[in-house]
Image (cartoon, rainbow, N blue to C red):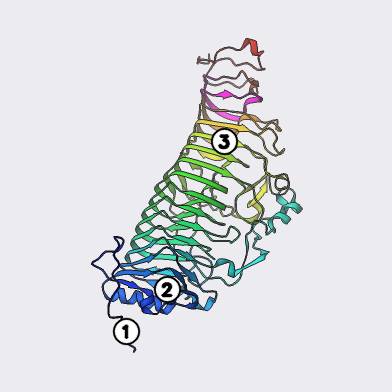
Amino acid sequence: MRKLLLPPIFLLLATPIFAQSLPVCDVRAFGAKGDGVTLDTSAVSVAIAACVKQGGGTVYFGPGRYVIGTVQLYSHIHLYLESGAALVGSHDIHDYLPSPPFGFARNYGVDITGEGSVLGMLIVKNAQDVSIEGEGEIDGQGDTFMAAQTSHGGNDYEEQYVRNPEKFRAAMSSVDYGPVEPNGRPGTLIVFFHCSNVRLHGITLRSAPNWTLHLQDVEGAAISDIQILNNPKVPNNDGIDCMQCRHVRISNCNIDTGDDGFAIVGSEHVNVSNCSISSRSAAIRLESTKLSTFTGLTMDTNRGIAVFGDSFVGQENRSTEDVTFSDIVIRTRLIPGGWWGKAEPIYIAVQPCAPGIACGVRVRNVVFNNITAEAENGVLLWGGEGTPITGVEMNGVRLHMISPNLALSESVGGNLDLRWTALTPRDAIFKSDIPAFYAKKVNGLRLRDVQVDWAGSMPGYFSDGLRIEDFNDLTIDSFAGLQAQTATGAAIYLKNGSGVSITNSRAMPGTRTFLQLDRVQDRRVFVNYDLRDAATAIAPADQRFDTQIGVPTTKRNPASRSKPTVANSRP
């Protein structure tokens, strides 16, 4: 066995970034060239081993481009990339290690990392106190592994059930917005597996060919002031994946990806704040996660906030609950290609229980506060058979609905996208009119201070302001809105439900019918409304609430407008 030859001294840099009690190993002192051509995997690994032998330390990269395949980090190792330094992924797939020997398999959220069976550039397993910091970058060279003119669109739906099938098919196979087809790519750029006390600060992660940063079964992580800049056409290049993790803090980050900005699965105590996210999939994807907050975010994306409830291996008995989203600005865009999502600013979808098997509530107690969205599609809450979405609250939500590009509205607009939670391709994508807010199979929904308005010209598939079906125990307070101007729908349309209270609400100018009721029982309260701008107050006109005063059935002359109503009890 060759003995590890160490340089006579370790470089101790006069900067407060490095702990003076630990060695600093400059990779160039161990043979790394940093010339952008030479494969430096071995030299970097030798530098890491030298620090490990000393009980840990800082592995230092000065300015240069260090080409590597897979490199493993260990406990108490701190990578520092100086400004002008870059770790660059090798273009040779054989320079990356296989992932199964490290314990990875194909169980989503449990032991999978990325697509495929090889690793990416950095792997950290069974380690503690590990950091990656500095002003340099890690560049995965993802474009090298893509067939840029071949679509990655999937066959995960049945074409005959969508609106305009031929145009839809053409849009799904477009490469203009991706996703494009991978061709023998490496795995996750950086993965921490069974680790604790993980830190990333200041660095830029660029051009990942697969998942970018993956935390799997990590206890305690702090990620701050990093950038993730990926090609938006590349599939599966999620920004930060956090699975079965606890006590994770992410702040002040800029994330530009093709796939999900954040994918957080099976985790607890995750706090994300002050980040900007751009994605052609979902800005945030959340599954089986509890006791977490998302605050002060901006999103320019296809789908904004996506919460899924499913029964995949490892997630069967885990629900998403006690999660809060606050102070978020969302801009969604309808795009072609095989990306999941149809420009929904907020999306919650639950997989139905299997026939004859009780599965319990999979999404409960999710709260949205102070959300502003400009969207080319509506909010969608879609509960599953036997597992309704329960206890969702929306407080201070502003929905400004705008028209998509005409060609896109004709090809992919007017469809609901339930891929991932649909049990069959038949139910994955299908034609539907689009309310600004559509909820189905929900219990205990609370809408407070929600406002819906529309651009002047909208495609004909847009419909109601709020539509809520198959519900129990619904509260609507301080709502202001109307239907799309191209529609004959209502500001509020309720169907197949029981237990509803509507208070302090207002019809906006142009409202045709303010409240449409269809098989709604236990109509509790309808008071303190201002319906001066509604042509029809309630339809059918004979529908009454337990506490209600008489309401006008036709629009009043503006000169005769009266003050908003006060409550009386129904005789």
Give the Cα distance between marks 3 and 1. 64 Å
Task: Tell me the magenta residue range.
Answer: 503-529
Instruction: For marks 2 and 1, give the one nearer the viewer.
Output: 1
Give the Cα distance between marks 2 and 3. 47 Å
Give the Cα distance between marks 2 and 1. 19 Å
Residue beneath the point at 67% across and 59% down: 175
Residue 348, image x, y percentages: 53, 45
Q: Mark 1 points at which residue?
A: 5
What's the amino acid at mark 2?
Val
Sooner in the amino-acid sequence: mark 2 or mark 3: 2
Q: Nearer the viewer, residue 97 or 217?
A: 97
Could you tell me what secondary structure mostly forms the magenta stretch? strand
Q: Mark 2 points at which residue?
A: 71
What's the amino acid at mark 1?
Leu
- Determine the residue located farthest toward the front in the rendered image: 14
**Residue 361 is at least partly visible in this image:** no
